[in-house]
Image (cartoon, rainbow, N blue to C red):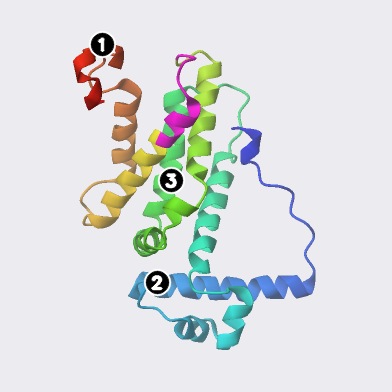
């Protein structure tokens, strides 16, 4: 994977900072458990503090507002994705279908391992406007995969890695939204992501958009 995915070296942490992180961790864990049980909107800061066995004011020493827990959840997931992607480094080039499938498999496993939390937090993430406010981190991940494939001649040089990254990010989130809304046994997230990526890689019609008659250009 691209070296940009590797996190920086972590500094040595003293006892005071460790205790601070421990309390923050308790608050975060308690919050996610309550969000999974009651939903994000129906959980108060007071309930989170009580579940973490700390004073209400302590919550605000670690999070300025409840919405900051959404950011913490997103960052935790990004760190888990980075760790999983870098867990099995290889010197050999990984072909595009395998590299893309590995990314989607890891994302599926993260979500499937905490379905209720994902349902609650994804809804809160969308309502808070985060898809429009945050940097499209997954676009960067997918763009790196596309760029690697392009450098090895797997796809045409004319393909924009960034644009393809956006498309794959849209595929992922669109599938994830449907998975969260459907009954638990409606479909397997990984299988659906795999099928969607297969369409992206192989196309729907198998022919270039250049073959579309000029009169239909407005429909593109």
Is 191 one of the magenta-colored residues? no
Q: Are marks 1 and 2 in contact (CB under 8 Å)?
A: no
- What percent of the width, then of the height, locates residue 36? 37, 69
Residue under label 2, please give it: 35
Q: How far apart are marks 3 and 2 (CA)?
A: 21 Å
Q: Do the residues labelled 3 and 2 touch (CB within 8 Å)?
A: no
- Taking 186 as reference, is 196 left or right? right
- What percent of the width, then of the height, locates residue 103? 46, 38
Sequence-earlier tag: 3 or 1? 3
Q: What element carries label 3?
A: helix
Residue at (57, 51) in percent of width and height? 79
Tell me, for residue 140, which label it has, or none.
none
Tell me, for residue 107, which label it has, or none.
3
- What percent of the width, then of the height, locates residue 156? 45, 14
Is 158 one of the magenta-colored residues? yes
Residue 54, visible in the rendered structure? no
Q: Give the range drawn in magenta.
A: 156-166
Of badges 3 and 1, the one in the foreground is 1
Residue 152, visible in the rendered structure? yes
Q: Is residue 186 above or below residue 171?
A: below
Q: Is mark 2 on a helix, strand or loop?
A: helix
Q: Are marks 3 and 1 in contact (CB under 8 Å)?
A: no
Sequence-earlier tag: 1 or 2? 2
- Taking 123 as reference, is 162 left or right? right
Sequence-earlier tag: 3 or 2? 2
Which image quarter holds the N terminus? top right
Q: How would you rate the neighbour count of disc 2 (Cα within 10 Å): few for under 14, some for 14-19, many for 20 or more?
A: many
Q: In this view, does 2 lie above or below 203?
A: below
Residue at (29, 33) in percent of width and height? 195
Q: How far apart are marks 3 and 1 (CA)?
A: 35 Å
Tell me, for residue 211, which label it has, or none.
1
């Amino acid at each position: 994977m691209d070296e940009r995915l590797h996190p920086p070296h972590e500094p040595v942490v003293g006892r005071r900072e460790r205790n601070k992180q421990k309390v923050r961790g308790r608050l975060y864990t308690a919050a996610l458990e309550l969000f999974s049980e009651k939903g994000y909107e129906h959980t108060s800061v007071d309930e989170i503090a009580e579940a973490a066995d700390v004073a209400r004011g302590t919550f605000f020493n670690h999070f300025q507002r409840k919405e900051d827990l959404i950011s913490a959840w997103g960052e935790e997931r990004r760190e888990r994705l980075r760790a999983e992607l870098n867990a099995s480094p290889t010197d050999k080039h990984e072909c595009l279908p395998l590299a893309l499938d590995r990314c989607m498999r890891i994302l599926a496993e993260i979500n499937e391992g905490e379905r209720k939390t994902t349902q609650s937090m994804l809804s809160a993430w969308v309502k808070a406007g985060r898809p429009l406010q945050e940097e499209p981190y997954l676009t960067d991940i997918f763009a790196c995969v596309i760029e690697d494939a392009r450098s090895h001649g797997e796809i045409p040089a004319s393909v924009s890695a960034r644009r393809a990254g956006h498309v794959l990010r849209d595929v992922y989130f669109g599938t994830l939204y449907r998975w969260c809304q459907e009954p638990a046994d409606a479909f397997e997230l990984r299988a659906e992501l795999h099928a969607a990526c297969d369409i992206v890689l192989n196309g729907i019609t198998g022919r270039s958009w250049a073959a579309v008659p000029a009169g239909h250009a407005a429909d593109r």
